Amino acid sequence: MITIIGITDAGPRSLPPKVLDRVRSAEVLCGGERHLAFFPEVRAERWVIQGSPSTSSGQRLAELVQYLRREAAKKQVVVLASGDPNFYGIGGYLSRHLPKEWIEILPNVTAVQLAFARIKESWQDAAIVSVHGRPIWPIIEVVRKSPKVAIFTDDKNTPGLVAKALLTAGISQRRAVVCEHLDGVQERIVDTTLEALPDQSFAPLNLLLLLDRPQDPGAQEQAEPSPPPLPCPPSPAPVTLGIPDSEFACKGGLITRQEIRVISLARLQLKKNSVVWDIGAGSGSLSIEAAQIAREGQVFAAEKDEACIQHILTNCLKFGIPPQAPDKPSRIHVIQGWAPEACRDWPAPDAVFIGGSGGKIGEILDLVFTQLRPNGRLVLNVIMLERLYEVLNRLRAQGWEVEVTQVSISRSKDILNMTRLVPLDPVFIVTAWNPEGRKR
């Protein structure tokens, strides 16, 4: 039997007597170093959990699962976790990887509950997000839209770094409350503002609350006159599916045409949190539209041509999606360089679009074969028959499912008070996926 027990930073004091007895009678005690240190008197085999269920790190977690498969039937195993083990915790991870009938979960109060209790605010309407072992950019739009947010941080994504990212994204005028070591002897509550956070340091174990500042009914009479508002920057151009080609700055027609772009985006099957690679980005047209679909995801665009890079940056700014820069998070990361070398440090994608390969399609596909996530989609735009032949051979040799669509577009043109159709180059849209990945 495996008992997953939630504790707070109060350690044993946060547990009822019957639950505490479970810990003390354990034959195997698992948990983070901080959790295990609360119980020095327990003479059990100890397993220090490393890595996080919310990240791809932590080979130790996979080893723990294998160990529990062997030993759980023979020994009383207790796993210690923070608060509610099913809330950004190890409970869900173990339930996915082990038979559920082996597991009992005894939750405690969460840090979110404690934090809102400390500031005496309700939290049923709060958005709850995490940057613990995760990037900051996905939470930006959540914070922008939510009057009340709880953010789990870590020693890298500190409250100060989160604040810098939010301020850079134009979010300000928020009450910020940093809650350190909740329910522990070192508990500290710092009630400040978002603007003040970057200059402060906090204990690694903390939770950040962001709240809209309440309007004081009497404040208007007492407050000094407000300064005149700053001039607003021009509104970004609207982003819709199938933006006309004429709206993009581009070099010599290096753009995925509107109609082809719409079909390619449909074939990519993007979700709101997808990680997208755009290889041979040209004008960045597909990246920009992909970023609007994957609003909580990331788009990585690689382009070798310096002039095209400048056009991508211009187009990103035009449509209100500034590209990634130091201390400036964005949904689009623009990299100048040749694929596949430029792509090797990117996170594993859910969708890959290849609009141009610079003659390196084989090397690029080899990288995609190893990096595309299960259930991911690969879409290529191909014009030359020889390139189509090469692509199909490589995909089929890898055992991938392939679908090919030829698209021929003609656009109307007025001439002598009449209308004729002007054809564009036909394009092969190749869609591919790993059937084994879809089964997992």
Image: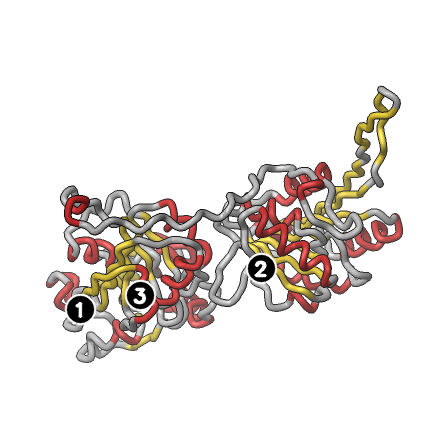
Q: Nearer the viewer, residue 264 or 148?
A: 148
Which label sits on residue 187?
1
Labelled pair 2, 3 in contact (Cβ < 8 Å): no
Q: Secondary structure at mark 3?
A: helix
Earlier residue among tags 1 and 2: 1
Q: Give the image location of residue 433, x and y in percent.
A: 67, 49
User: Residue lying furthest top in this view?
Assistant: 417
Q: Quadrant of residue 403?
A: top right
Labelled pair 1, 3 in contact (Cβ < 8 Å): no
Q: Is residue 384 visible?
A: yes
- Whether 66 is drawn above or below 220: the answer is below
Q: Give the image location of residue 263, x and y in percent.
A: 69, 38
Q: Nearer the viewer, residue 283 or 385?
A: 283
Which label sits on residue 81?
none
- 1 vs 3, front mark: 3
Amino acid on which disc 1 is placed: Glu
Report the residue at 70% width, 60% height from top.
303
Earlier residue among tags 1 and 3: 1
Which label sits on residue 197?
3
Q: Secondary structure at mark 2?
A: strand
Amino acid on which disc 2 is placed: His
- Whether 365 is drawn above or below 9: the answer is above
Label 3 environment density (alpha carbons within 10 Å; few <14, some 14–19, many ≥20): many
Amino acid on which disc 3 is placed: Leu
Q: Is residue 374 visible?
A: no
Residue highlighted by disc 2: 333
- Image-based side of 266 in relation to 17, left or right: right
- 1 vs 2, front mark: 2
- Whether 7 is drawn above or below 268: the answer is below
- Image-based side of 259 in relation to 181, left or right: right
Report the residue at 21% width, 45% height from top.
215
Label 1 environment density (alpha carbons within 10 Å; few <14, some 14–19, many ≥20): some
